[in-house]
Structures are given as structure tokens and as C-alpha cells.
Image (cartoon, coloured by chain):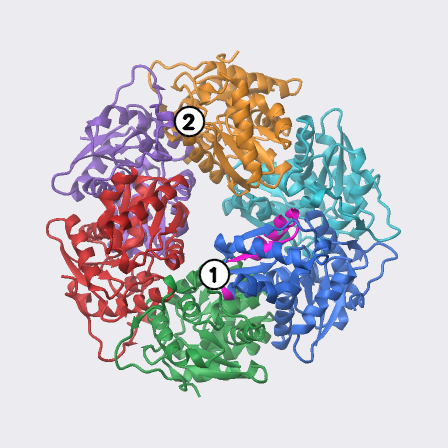
Chain colours: A red, B green, C blue, D cyan, E orange, F purple
């Protein structure tokens, strides 16, 4: 099966990194297709970025819609999830919900570690709209900008571990990595803090594979149906293409 | 003062109509500036449309940001509100919240009449994220597509009045018009059903004037601050302009 | 238009002060009518006071009901709001809800600074009943009794600023002044703490003007209708008059 | 022990009736003291009535405060409960909460049958503020005015039984009589509908006896403390006395 | 009347102690019947224990079902309450709900002091399922294991008093003893901390007596009816008896 | 990997059936281990059954704990989940949560079709405790007892399809089969009603495989830790064994 990993931002090195994480956990026979939006934001760190990224991501789906079996939305707490589900028939899994669901299976409450302080509220809105916020004991920002996460990986891990320990002390049983850019550090962090750590990219890839394996498609009888049977006619900006191979 | 009315869709006749409604209630000295996005959807009737419209609207704000004193987001239940507040310092009022607030001052519970069935859930999400959903007794879709509202105004009013009466019977004290395209029918409908009817476009224009009058600006200390002090660098699609005079 | 400012307590100097605040923001053509209840409490600082004040305020409305176009209920977190709406047809705006609504337009979450510790829970109940508590990040009492607020204005501002800073640190984007007696300090405080500060008296006057401007009246089809069409026959205590000019 | 039954309205025949109901369930050694407010409303059937009744009831407590061991607030869904708790040290039990608590011990969800349609929302607010609304499956008004309940008791029982059956069909396991004027019909109704029926007057008397038996007094460390240690100085209207023997 | 006190664990000395507490508050004519399950856990300190204890307790009810007028479930926060209500017609009162209800009559918010940290979440689930969690300001564990509570009573009281003071400082008006093993310390603790302290065992005994006095039986029309009219046929493990006299 | 399917009841034919369903979706290399409790209820159709089944299921885990890599709890809406997670280190997935999670990925709201009317409230409690109830639009009972489901499969499917259509009409996008005994009818039903149908047994098997594949174990730092480091010492009833091969 072919599962697209749609990065929420335009930074191809991040698409590459998250594709690698997804590839490591993918089952035999799964092809991971990296997708980087052709326009949008270099990193999504708040409401404004998130709304721009949502449309850029939906735009990117146009070019690949007919060639994939499932989509992973790889932007933690970012908007657009319900739009992608309305646009496509194949399964769409957001890393926010996949991570929260895995965490709920491993502990009673989960805490989220994210990057910028302005990313906290979009994450909270996303969890509230998912109906999964009740099991969230807290969301902590490290203050490290998304694009700096990879610069000093030792320091990043230290700061994330410290935030994780505070979340555990405040009642979390499980830590969720609240940024696709942190995906690679799951095992290391888990050993450091002595508690399960969930990375949304690998969780979402796995759940997307699950839905395809079960031959599920998105429901088209309610919120994700097309209004009046029609397919929305979008006028996208001119001269914009989609990069489907960006992350290789 | 100069208040922009940002239509959420690209249909200029709707921008014209809502600008007329806003102009009728505007105070002396208020200039209503119609804004139609240069790209996006002809009408927003569900999650997909709404996320596309959000980014198109944020894009349209770039061209006018420095020339206005306030913005009315004229898409009922549409996304983007928190992004516009982060982008701008001047007051931003969404017709969804303004209508709900006016309704809460006039009755204990309000019901919403909207267009397509797929528009119901985005409206619900918007009210939940606003924290105003608790006072909402129900949202009913008429099934009339947005772009057909103006075709047979007698029938539209009949259908909207019938949905309103059902909402009143189910516990609403006040009716909220859940689509900017219904703005003009407020007085007529109110007389028909014997209860207050709130139109978000005029409510939002008035509340936006209020905030400017009180010299308020959007808070920049929390969720609407820029991450790390920086201004997000968006790469918008090439060759796209903004129409600020579209609705005249 | 004639808007009554109904002080919740019997202290006329406070009626004078809040009338002055309202007068400064009122539009041309608005006459602000001060109303002080003829009986009740010198200051309302908890549940007991609040219930006494509610009836005294409703009593005071009898004498002015036919002469006004709207009412501002000037007691932060005090009871009686729904009773006044049932009693009158003209718009009634409570400073609690007006302040919360303005705050919700300027930030994602607001914090409330109030006076006595026993005032916190009535405010919380009021916001819960309004359905606006979800956007409230906290309510802090300064411990300064209502009637001492004006004694040492420098110290009052210091204490209120300190409480505001704590609320901002705990997640508030906007500060709401949780006592009509603090109304005058809005601009000074806002400059001190670098965030928007909302005063309910001026917010409510403006929203009351708005509703009159839009020709709205309170809904009489549901919770605010008279039972069985009858008007309640109240036996008020003998020998009690109403002061409508008390605040001048 | 001496337990006051404070009628929320000024109709002495109702005080007599509810005192009789309370007397039948009272334990040996309990003296039931009927109290009718000296002013207020003949019956409380909505928000306005409820706020007037709350203050009239608090006023009536002044004359008896030092002579009683506990108070039953006999107005279903009426305001004032938290004020009476702040005013007194002895236990105060509201028939709304006592009925809801008994009902929660007998079934998973309870339904409330009340009188006027305008009484529904004050009851809902009361249950929400008590934190007991979650177990309430519905509140139905019969449309019979409070003062007409006793006129045709056969018809009243028929109408109440019909409303009760609808509540059971919609998910209630237990019926709560939502008006002190219905207190006498508990057993008859229970036999008719085949489900437990709870009357707040007898439930509250019993729970008030319980608290006195356990030597409990109301907490004075938080919401029910006096602000700054002071006792509120209320200026009640002149020439008003209190009838403590009204219901005999 | 005969009220069974069903200890949730198999430690007979605890059954003895809670029977003594219940006996001290019981009315004349009430016979308190101690019941210790024949199998189960020595103390219940978390989810696992709680689910084992629930079935062991239900098993113990078989032997006494026809000989009692009411049951007190003496395990704070333990499971099984709804099962006992379905099994029996006579009133069943859980010490968790009785304590919470008494506390709600004495203050606006209550805090719970319990034993092991792993007992906190079962208590929270129990209060949530009761719909009484909203009035709970916090649950604190002392870390003292249930079976050690009686070893050094001076130290136990010190530790419980300290936890209670923290709960009061964080907003509780009333303290609830969150373990049947703490039942005896109510008066002493209340004097130490200057606030009401509620013990569930005595509260539940009293409320159970109340329901019997009012001739209430558990509703059999909804959640506690037997499915399809049948009585569940349980295959209990072989060779297991029930001790009904264990606590004497 | 070895995944145990723990039937919540003692009816081996149901264990056989659900093992077959699980086996059909299992990945290569997964061994499905059927487990039938040695005691308990023939079918679980309400609170009483559910609490008995929970302990019987926990008892059954003792014999297999060291030989398995994961457990599926195959009782829809039944108790015991949190206890099994505390008892074991390997992943435990309840069919209730797995079904709800899959459903949340495929639609905005799911409806549940179950058997007996008394099974509805345990399901609701389970979803509330999971924090997943918000996305549930309704739970409908067909009235068919669990053990009759297989008797007339044509009629069962008809009745379940009718209940499903009502749930769709009331707002569900996806149907969840609320009984392990319905697991086999997923595909047939989905085709009949034109919407996704989720069966918890296969969903839970897949998610359990996922967690093992990701090398996750249950968090032992919070709610699922052992109190004071100790392992609870349970006294199970004498003479009771565990059948691990019952379902073959």
C-alpha cells in the first residue's frame, strides 16, 4: 500500500526526516510517499501558520489523491484534518490524534511536549475538537523553535526530557511528542524518563496502515460528505505545483 | 474609521450584499471596505471549503493590513479567526462570535439556521472553540446551497422561517442567521416568527466599531503573539493579488 | 437614547463614579441615567450580598421601567440579570457578560481581578451560567474591600497590577476588572501590564447602545416570557421608594 | 431540634401544606417551624420571581436565625441557597439539592416535573450550580400554575403522571417533584407510574435532621465566610416584619 | 431496620472498626450488620484491587440479600455500586457518594484525602460517574498504605491534617475522608483544621436509614432493571462461602 | 507475537467466534490465544454482570500473564480495563476503546448498536471514563439478548441495520458494533447501510499488534503502578482454575 506523509510545512529536510521515521516502522509492502507543500510556511508555530499550512496541505493533496491508499497528516496540532477527510475517500490519520490514541492505550493521562509557546493553543483546540483533550494532563512548550530542533540534538533532548519530567510530576503517565520534528527521539527519551513516549508520525503511519488493512474508507454520509453531492470547485492560486518527491 | 468586511468566499456579489448590510448599520464616520479573496472557494459549505477559505482570507489581509482600523470576518462558522488575530494588531471580529454574543444578550439560548448540512459541524466546532456552544440550543440546515439563497428570496424566507420555528419549539429564544448570505432578511424574519433574529454581519460591524471606539487592540502577550518575536515568513503562491475593491 | 446604570449597591459615590466612566465612552445622544437602589447592601462582596442586591435592583427598576431604552447592570458577578431581562422588554446588559465578551474578542483567555475572596465564587457562578467560563483562565481576589478601593488609589493600582501579572503568567491574554469600583483604572493599568484591560461598565454601556441602535428587544418567547401571560404581582416592602437621580 | 421550613413565596396555605408534609416524615423530637416571608411573590414561577423570593427569604431568616438548628429552603429551583449558607452557621438544605441527591441514590438518572414553563430554566441553573445537572435526564413543565395545583387534585395528578411517564420513556429512572406544592402527591404518583418519586420537602427535612444529628455546621473557611471578617450590613426596607408562625 | 456494612476488603479488623463508627451514629432501632467478603483483597488501593473487591462484595451480598433493609458499600472510590443496585431492591448507599453529598451541603467545594497514590484515579472515576466531580476541588494521597493507617494514629492524623490544610488552601471548604479506614478521626481532625470533615461510613449509614425511613426502593425501570426480565445466572467459584458475622 | 483474546463471559462458543474474527484480520506471525474465564456470567448485559465479569477476567489473566505479548479485552463496555493494565506490563486493548478510536478516524461522530437495554449505561460509563464519549452521537439497544444473537442471524442483521439507520439519521457518521457477539457481521452491515461499521474485536486485535510492534509497554509511573511498589495479594476463591484453551 502507498501511504503519503504530508509535511505541514515547506522545509524539505523535515519531510526527509519524518519519512525516515515512518519508513522504519512501516510494514513490509508499505511504500511511504513524502509530500512537501509547494507553498506555505517554513515551520508552523501558531494559529496563523497553522491555517496557512492547512490550505497548502489540502492543495498538495490534489496532485496525489488518486495514487495513494492513505494519508498521514504530519503537523502536530495543525488544522486541516477534517478538510482532508472530506476531500478524500481513503483513510486520513492526523499525527495529533494517532499519538493521543496510542498514549490513551498506555496510560490514563498523557502530557504533550511541544516547541513554541504559541503552538500550545492550536494543539489544545485540536485535541478539544477531537474530543481527546480530557485525557491530556498538560501541554508544555520548550521554547525551542521548530527549525532549531535539529541544530543541537543533545541540548534538545535535555530540554524535552526536563519538560517531560515536569509533565509526569503533574500527573501524566505517558509523554506525547508534540512536533513532527521530534519524532526521531522517542526511544532515547523514553529510556531517559522511564515512561512511554509516543511519536505521532510512527503512530499515525501504523494506524493508517491498519485502516487500509481493514479496507476502511472515510464515511461519506455525514460531516465529510460533499454538500449537495457536488465537489467543491476551488480556485487555487495560479502557477502553483505540488512536490510529491520532496522528501526523498 | 475604516473597517474591512472580508468575505470568506470569492463571489463578489455576496461581498456587495454584505457590504450593503454593514453600511446600513454603520455609524457616521465609519467606512466599510469590502474585501474579496483573490482565490479560494465560490461558497464555503463544509470543512474543506472552510480551510481553503481561511488561508485565502489571511492572504487577502496582507494587502490591507496597514490601511484599516478593524476587520470583520464575514464567513459564518468558518476557520481562520485566531490566525487573523495573530496576524493583525487591530480588532478582528468574526460574524460567528458577534452573532452568538448579541443573541446571548437577548435570550437564554439561541438556535442557528444555516444552509448546507455539511456546514453544521464547522459551525459547531467554531462555537465550541469560542466557548459559546453551551448557549446554543441547536443548528439546523435548510439544505439550500449558499449561492442559491438569493435566487428565490420568497422561498428562502419561507424555508428559513420554518427552520427557525422548529428551533424555537426546541428551546431557542433567539435565532441566529448562520450564513452571511442571509444577512439582509433579519427584520422580515423577526416579524414573521415573533422572536429576535441576529445577523452576524451587522453585529460584527458594530462590535468592531465598539472595539475601535474603546481604542482596544488585540492582546499580543499570549496565544496571538508571534513565536520568538519573529513574524512568520509565508511563501504565498506566485502571481496572486488581492482585490480590495471587489464588493463595491 | 436613555440608558440606566443600575448600581448593585446603595453607595451613591460609587454610582457617581461609574456614571462618570459610562459618560466618557457614551455616544452623542446617549443620556446616562444613574440609579441607586433605595435599600440593599453598601457593597456586594459575596453570595448573601449579591442575592439581597439582586432584589433591591429589581425593585429599583419598577420606577424607571417606562422611561428608559436600556439598562446596564453594574455589579460584577452579581445576581439578578435573568430577572431584569424577564421584567423589561428593553435591552439589559450585565457588566459581567459585556466585559467577558469584549475580552473574548481581544484574546483567547481572560483573567478576572476582583476585591474580596468571597466575591470569587459568585463571579464564577455568573460566568458558568453565562456559558462564558470556559474562556476564563482564573479569578483572583486582591483582598481589598470594595469600599476601600478609592481610599489609596496608588496602592489599589499596585495590588491590582500585581494580581493581573499573575493572571497573565498563568495564561490570561486579557484582564477583566471584576468590580465596578475599578472601572476608572482601565487605561493606566493596561499601560502598566502591557495587555488589554476590559472594564465592564464601559463595555456594557457600549453594548447596550448597540442593541438599542439595532432596535433589538429581549426575547419574550422562552425563558424571559411571563408565566401564563401574567405579570408577576410582587408585594414589595412598604414605604420604600426608588432613587433614580442618586448618582449625580 | 428545631428545623425551619422557609416557604419561598408569601402564600401561607402553601406554607401550611409543606409543613404538614415535613411533619409527617420528621423524627421524634424534631419541631418543624413554618416560615412565610413578609413580602415577595405569591408564587415563584421564573427568574424574576426567584430573585425577589431569594431576598425576601433571606430577610425572613433574620428574625429566626438564633432560634433554629437548621433550615429547609422550600422553593424548588429558587435562588438564595448560597446566601442562606453564608448568613447562618446552622445547616441549610435546599429542596432542590435534597431531592436530586435522594434521586441519585435510587436511580442513574432523574427527571423533574415542574409547573410553569418559565420555571424550567431557573431549575436547570440551580442544578448546574449544584453540579448535579449531569444526572438529570430532563425537566418538563406541566403548564399548571403553582397556585392552581391544589384546585383540581385529580387533574393535577393526571397531568403530573403523564409528564412523569414521558420522562421515564426518555431515560429517567426516578421522578423528582419540581415544586414544593406537589409534595403531598409522592406516594400516589409513585404507585401510578411504577417508579420512585422524590419530594424535596421531605427529603430536605430528613437531610437537615441528618446534618444536625451529625453536629455539622456550614463551613466558614471559604465561599461562605464573611468577607474581611465583617458581617454584611444590610439596609432592609422600612416597616417590614417577619412572620414565623405563618404556616400553622 | 437492618443495615449491612459491606467492607470492600477482607481485613476483618477494618470491618470491626467501621461497624463501630456506624454504630455510634445509628438511630435507635437500627441494627448494623458487618459483612466481610470471603475472598478478595486485604486492602483496596487501586484499579486492580477495586475490580476484584467489587465482585467479591457482590458475591457476599448473595447470602444476605433477603435479610437486610439496606446496604452501605464501605469502600471509598471502589467499584461495584451500580451492580449492587441492580442486584438488590433495598437501598444501597456508597460511602463515596454519601460523603460527597454531605460535603456539598456544608460547603461549595470539597477536597478528598486518601491513602495510596494509586487510589486517586479510581476515586476520581467514581465521582465522575456519580456526576459529583465538579464540586471536588482536589484529591490528595498521603502515601500511607491502608493497612498502616491504624499503626501510628498520631502520625496518621498529622499527615492527614497536613494534606487537608493543603486542600483548604487550594479551594476546598470541606474535607472528605477518602478511606473507610480513616472514619474514626473525623471529630479530631475537624477541630484541628477548623473546617467540616465528612466521613463516608457514618454519612452513608445515615442516608441509608433515611431511604428506608422514607420507604424508598431502588428504581427498577431503567439502568438497574434486569435485562429481559431475567435474573443474571452467575457461576461463582466453587467452595466459596460468605462471612456475614465477620466484623463483630 | 501471542495476543490473548479474553472473552468477558463464560460462553465458549462466543470465545470461539471472536477468536475466528480476530484470526481473520491478524497479521502473519500473530498467534491468537482464546481465553474463557473459569467462572462468571454466561453473558454480560448490565452493571451487575459487568462487575462480576471484570474480576473473573482479571482472575483468568493470572494463568497466562507470563506467556503473552498483549491482551484484547473482548467485552464491549465492560469493566476491568484499568485493572488489567495495572496487573500486566504488556499492552492491553479494550474492544470498546479500539472500536471508538477507529470510528473517530473514519467520521466525526459514531453511534453504538448494542443488545440489552441495560447494557447501554455501562457502555456510556466506559466511554465517559475513556474520555471518548463526546464523539458518540448515541447508543441504541436492539433488545436482543447476547446469547440469542446467533440464533436467527438474518433477523439479527435486520434489527441491527434498522438501529444503525436510526443512529445515522440522528447524526452518526460511523456505526460501532457494541457487542463482541456482533463482530462477524461488520462487512455485511456496512454494505447494507452505506457507512463504515467498526467491530471492536478486530480493531482491538490490530491495535494490540500495533503496540507490540512499536515495543510499547503500559506506563508504570502513574495510575497503573503498584501501590508502594508491592504487588496486590489477592485471595481468589478456592478450587478455581483458568481455561486458556476454551475457545478453540
| Residue C108, numbered label | 1
Mark 1 surroundings: few (<14), some (14-19) or many (≥20) residues within 10 A: many
Q: Quadrant of residue A48?
A: bottom left
Residue D75 at least partly seen: no
Can you identify the residue that label 2 sits on? E45
Expressed as whole percent of the image width and height from the top left, the position of residue D73 reads 71, 41
Which residue extends farthest front? C154
Residue F122 at least partly seen: yes
Q: What residue span does the magenta drawing correspond to?
A: C106-132
Expressed as whole percent of the image width and height from the top left, the position of residue D96 reads 64, 43
In this image, E167 relative to F219: left or right? right
Foreground: disc 1 or disc 2: 1
Give the secondary structure at mark 2: loop
In this image, A64 relative to C100: left or right? left
Give the secondary structure at mark 1: loop
Evaluate whether label 1 is on the same chain as label 2: no
Q: Is residue F57 above or below residue B213?
A: above
User: Count of labels shown?
Assistant: 2
| Residue C1, numbered label | none
The C terminus of chain D is located in which quarter?
top right
Of B159 and D100, the residue lying toward us: D100
Q: Residue at x 31, y 34 (%)?
A: F147
The residue marked by circle 1 belongs to what chain?
C
The residue marked by circle 2 belongs to what chain?
E
Q: Quadrant of residue D95?
A: top right
Which residue extends farthest bottom? B248
> Residue C127 in magenta?
yes
Q: Residue at x 78, y 66 (%)?
A: C247
Q: Residue at x 28, y 44 (%)?
A: A197
Expressed as whole percent of the image width and height from the top left, the position of residue F178 reads 33, 43
Q: Is residue E117 above or below residue C91?
A: above
Amino acid at each position: 500500500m502507498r501511504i503519503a506523509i504530508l509535511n505541514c510545512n515547506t522545509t524539505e529536510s523535515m519531510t526527509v526526516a519524518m519519512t525516515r521515521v515512518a519508513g522504519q516502522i512501516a510494514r513490509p509492502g508499505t511504500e511511504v510517499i513524502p509530500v512537501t507543500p509547494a507553498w506555505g510556511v517554513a515551520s508552523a508555530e501558531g494559529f496563523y501558520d497553522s491555517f496557512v499550512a492547512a490550505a497548502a496541505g489540502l492543495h498538495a493533496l490534489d496532485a496525489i489523491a488518486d495514487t495513494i491508499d492513505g494519508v498521514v497528516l504530519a503537523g502536530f496540532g495543525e488544522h486541516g484534518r477534517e478538510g482532508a477527510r472530506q476531500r478524500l475517500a481513503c483513510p486520513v490519520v492526523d499525527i495529533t490524534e494517532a499519538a493521543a490514541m496510542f498514549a490513551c492505550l498506555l496510560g490514563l493521562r498523557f502530557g504533550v511536549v511541544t516547541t513554541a509557546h504559541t503552538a500550545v493553543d492550536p494543539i489544545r483546540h485540536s485535541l478539544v475538537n477531537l474530543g481527546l483533550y480530557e485525557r491530556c494532563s498538560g501541554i508544555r512548550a520548550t521554547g525551542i523553535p521548530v527549525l532549531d530542533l535539529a541544530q543541537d540534538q543533545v541540548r534538545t533532548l535535555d530540554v524535552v526530557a526536563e519538560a517531560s519530567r515536569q509533565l509526569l510530576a503533574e500527573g501524566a503517565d505517558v509523554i506525547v511528542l508534540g512536533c513532527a520534528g521530534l519524532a526521531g527521539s522517542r526511544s532515547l527519551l523514553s529510556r531517559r524518563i522511564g515512561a512511554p513516549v509516543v511519536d505521532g508520525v510512527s503512530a499515525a503511519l501504523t494506524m493508517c496502515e491498519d485502516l487500509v488493512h481493514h479496507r476502511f474508507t472515510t464515511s461519506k454520509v455525514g460531516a465529510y460528505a460533499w454538500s449537495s453531492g457536488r465537489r467543491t470547485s476551488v480556485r487555487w492560486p495560479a502557477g502553483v505545483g505540488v512536490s510529491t518527491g520532496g522528501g526523498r
